[in-house]
Image (cartoon, coloured by chain):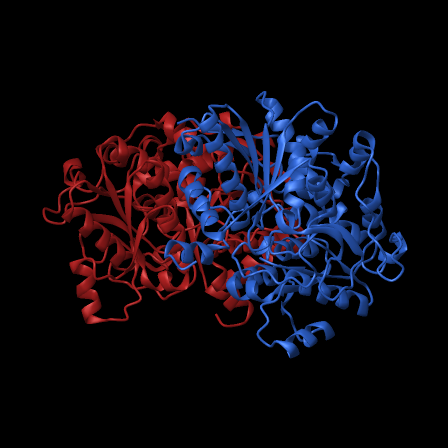
Chain colours: A blue, B red
Amino acid sequence: MKNIKITLSDSEIPEYYLNISYYLKKYLGRLPDSPLNPGTKQPIKGEDLAVIFPMELIKQEVSLEEKITIPEEVRELYKLYRPTPLIRAYRLEKFLDTPARIYYKYEGTSPTGAHKLNTAIAQAYYNKKEGTKTLATETGAGQWGSALALAANFFEMKLVVFMVRVSFDQKPFRKTVMETYGAEVFASPSEKTEFGKKILKAKPDHPGSLGIAISEALETVVKNKGYKYSLGSVLNHVLLHQTVVGLEAKKQMEKIGEYPDIIIGCCGGGSNFAGLAFPFLVDKLKRKKKTRYIGVEPISCPSLTKGQYRYDFGDTACMTPLLKMKTLGSDFIPSPIHAGGLRYHGMAPLISFLYEEKLMEAVAYEQNPVFQAGVDFARCEGIIPAPESSHAIKAAMDEAIKAREEGKKKVILFNLSGHGLLDLNGYDKFLHNQL
Amino acid sequence: MKNIKITLSDSEIPEYYLNISYYLKKYLGRLPDSPLNPGTKQPIKGEDLAVIFPMELIKQEVSLEEKITIPEEVRELYKLYRPTPLIRAYRLEKFLDTPARIYYKYEGTSPTGAHKLNTAIAQAYYNKKEGTKTLATETGAGQWGSALALAANFFEMKLVVFMVRVSFDQKPFRKTVMETYGAEVFASPSEKTEFGKKILKAKPDHPGSLGIAISEALETVVKNKGYKYSLGSVLNHVLLHQTVVGLEAKKQMEKIGEYPDIIIGCCGGGSNFAGLAFPFLVDKLKRKKKTRYIGVEPISCPSLTKGQYRYDFGDTACMTPLLKMKTLGSDFIPSPIHAGGLRYHGMAPLISFLYEEKLMEAVAYEQNPVFQAGVDFARCEGIIPAPESSHAIKAAMDEAIKAREEGKKKVILFNLSGHGLLDLNGYDKFLHNQL
C-alpha cells in the first residue's frame, strides 16, 4: 500500500504569521468584541497588559496587519523540527472503506511532541528581547509547560509552571520533561500563591483546573519583578503564531493539487485548530471556497457546543481581562478526562466569534469513543495520537463514514496536533476497560 | 544561533541495504567465524534456522552480496518517517567550548521513537511473504517490542513479546504501546514457557534479562506452528537493515562537504552503531579514510570492553546457535540500569569482529554521567535522548572536550538512536539524586 508523505524544505518554513483579524475586517466587516478591563468595563488598553506581557505580544494581540514577520531567530529554531509532514491516511481510508481522501498535518515531530512549541519559541523570543528574566505559566496535560520549558531554557530564562493537579498525578512524566529542561513545576492548586492556598483550604483534595492554574501563574507574575506570563492558547497572538501549521499545510496540499472540503481540529483553547484552519479560512472569507470547519471538543468540557457567548474571565480568580468567548463559566471544573489539554472552561475569542458567525461548526464526544479512534488510528497509521488529537481523529472518521454513505469523494484534512507517548496511562486504562 | 538540519527527500531513502561482509571479504580478506550448531559444533546450516526464521532472512544472514535491494513495500513504509534528519549540534559545541563540529543522526522521529523500526518493518515484511502467522520476540527497554508490534500489525500478523521483567516494571508504558498496536506482552521470566517457569521456581523475584527473554521467545516459536522468531539486534541481517541510517547520513554529510573523523554509537547488541557506521566503514576498509569508530556501553554490561571473544549462546537457555562474539557469558544478568536496550550479555558477531580487528574502539560509562550528558543535551539541543543514546552523547562530549584540549577541529558524528520520552522514570530519579 502506498504511503504519501508531503514534505517541504526548510526554506519553505513560513516567513510570516497570518493575521485572520485583517481578513475578518476586510471581508466580513466585523471583528470579535474587544477584551474589557474588569474594573472599568471599557476596552482594555495595551498598557493594562504590560505587567504580564511584553509590548510586542500586546501589539500582536490587537494588530490588524495582514502578516507579521517571523523573526529570523525564531525561524531558525523552527528549523529544528519544521516543516512538519502532511500525510495521506491511506490505511485509515481503507479501514473505513471510504471514498474520502484523508490527510493529517502531523505536529508530533516537535521535540516536545506537539504543536505548542510553535508559540512557545515565539513568546520566549519576544520576552527575552524585552528583558524578561522569569516566565510563569499554567499547564493542563503538560504539553504547554513542556514546550515553554524547552523554549525558556533556549533563551536562558527561568520558568515556573503551575500544573493542574489531576494531570500532575495522571502524567507525572510531563513534570520530568519540564524539570529536564530546567523548569520548576508545582501541582495546582498549590501553597505557592494566596489563591492556591484559599482553594486548598476550602477543598484540600481539589483536582485543579486550568482556570485555577492560570490564576496562580498570574498572581506569581504580578507579585514578582522581572516576571512575565505566557499562555499556551486562547489569545489572538497565540493563535497567530500557530498559523505556521496551516500555512505549511496549504502549500503541501497545493503541491499535490488538493484542497480540503472539511478541516478538523480539536479545540481546548483553540490554538491548534486555528493554526491549521486560519490560512484556509481566508479563502472562505473571500468566498472562493466552501470548506466546512469543524472544531471537536470533549462532552465533559463542551465550551463551543454548550457554552454561552458572553464576557467572562479567562481564569478562576478573575484576574484576567474579561474575554468575549464561548464559556462554561470561569469557575467550571471539568471532569478529569485524559485529554487534559482540552479541559478549559473558555475558548479563544476568535474561535468563539467564528462559531457564532456560523463560519465553523463544533461537535463533542465522550472519552471512550475518542480513545477507540486513537487505537484504530495507531493500528492503521502507526502513530499513537495524543488523546486531544484523537478528538479530531474521531470527527474525521465520522466525516469519512458520512462520505462513504453519501458516496462522495470528500477531502478531509485534520490536525494531528501531537503524539500520545506521554499519555499512555489513558490508553492503558482504555485497553483494560477501566475508562 | 544558527540551526543546521540537513534533510533528504523521500526519493533519497536508500534503495538497498549495504552488506559489510562483502567489503570485509574483499578488503580485509577475513570474515567473522560462522555460527555453530551447538550439537555438532559444525557451522550452522541454513535449514537449521528454518524453524525460527524465514528463508529470505537466513539468506541475508550469510550473504556476501554487496547490496541487497530494499523491497518496494518496505521502502514505501519507510517513507512514513524517513529520511531522518542530520543535525549540527551548535549549542552543544558552544556549551563545550569546542572547535569540534558535532553532528547527530536523529532516529527518534520514527513513530515508536527509535531506530528499531528500520529492521522491524523489513523482518515483518519477509515473514509475511513466507506465510508467518505469529511472531514471537523478546524486548528489554521495550523499544524493540514496540517497533515490532507496529510492524507486525501493519502486516496483519500477531505478535507475542517477552519483556525483561525489570524493564516491564520500570517502563509500564512500553507495554501499553505494544498493546495499542495489538501485541500480547508478558513479563519475563514468565509462566508461559517451561524455561520461564524453571527460572521463577529457583528465584521468584528474578529481574529477568534479555538472554532469558530470548529463550522464552524461542521456546514459544519452536513449540507452535506458524510462529517465527524476530530479533532486534545482534544478527547480520538486522545490522544489514540498519544501514539505511548510515547510507542516509553519508549522503547528508556529503551535501555539506563534511566527513566524520569520529563516529560514535551506543552498543547493546550493536545494530544502531552498525547502521550508522558500516556505510562509512567501507571507506576505512578501502584505506581512503582514517575515521575512528567508537562503540559505547554501560559499565554494568561491558561486553566489548570486558567480555571474552569466544563462542557463546545468544540466550540463557542455550537454544540459539553458538555465536562467535564478545560475551560476558549467556547466564550474565546485568544490573537493572535504565538503559534497558544495552543490557545484553553478548554483542553482534560483526561488531565483535571489528573490535578484535582493532577497526573500532569501545568505551564504557557509569549510569549517572550518562544521564547528566542526556540532561545537558536536552538543555542544549531540545531533544530529550533515550538513556541508551545518552551513552553515545557522553562519548561524543568527551571527544569534543579532547578536541578542545588538542585545539583540533574534529568532525564528530553520533547516532541519536532514540528519544527518551518513554524513559522519564530514569530522568526523574536522576534529577532527584536517586540513581
Residue A192 location, quadrant: bottom right
In the displayed structure image, the side of residue B225 where residue A99 appears, left or right? right
- Residue B50: x and y in percent read 17, 38
Total number of numbered labels? Answer: 0
Is A211 placed above or below A259 here? below
Q: Position of residue B434 (x, y in %)?
A: 50, 72
In the foreground, B198 or B368: B198
Q: Residue at x 84, y 56 (%)?
A: A49
Whole-percent x, y for residue A58 in the image? 83, 50
Find residue A220 and report its image quarter.
Answer: bottom right
Q: In the rendered view, would you say A250 is above or below A32?
A: above
Kindly tell me whether residue A268 is visible in this rendering. Answer: no
Q: In the image, is residue B110 above or below residue B310?
A: above
User: Left or right: where does residue A279 sit relative to residue A223?
Assistant: left
Q: Residue at x 50, y 66 (%)?
A: B368
User: Is residue A129 among the parts visible in the rendering?
Assistant: yes
Q: Residue furthest top?
A: A257
Q: Is residue B127 above or below residue A151?
A: above
Horizontally, residue A61 falls left or right of residue B30, namely right
Hey, which residue is sitting farthest bottom in the picture?
Answer: A201
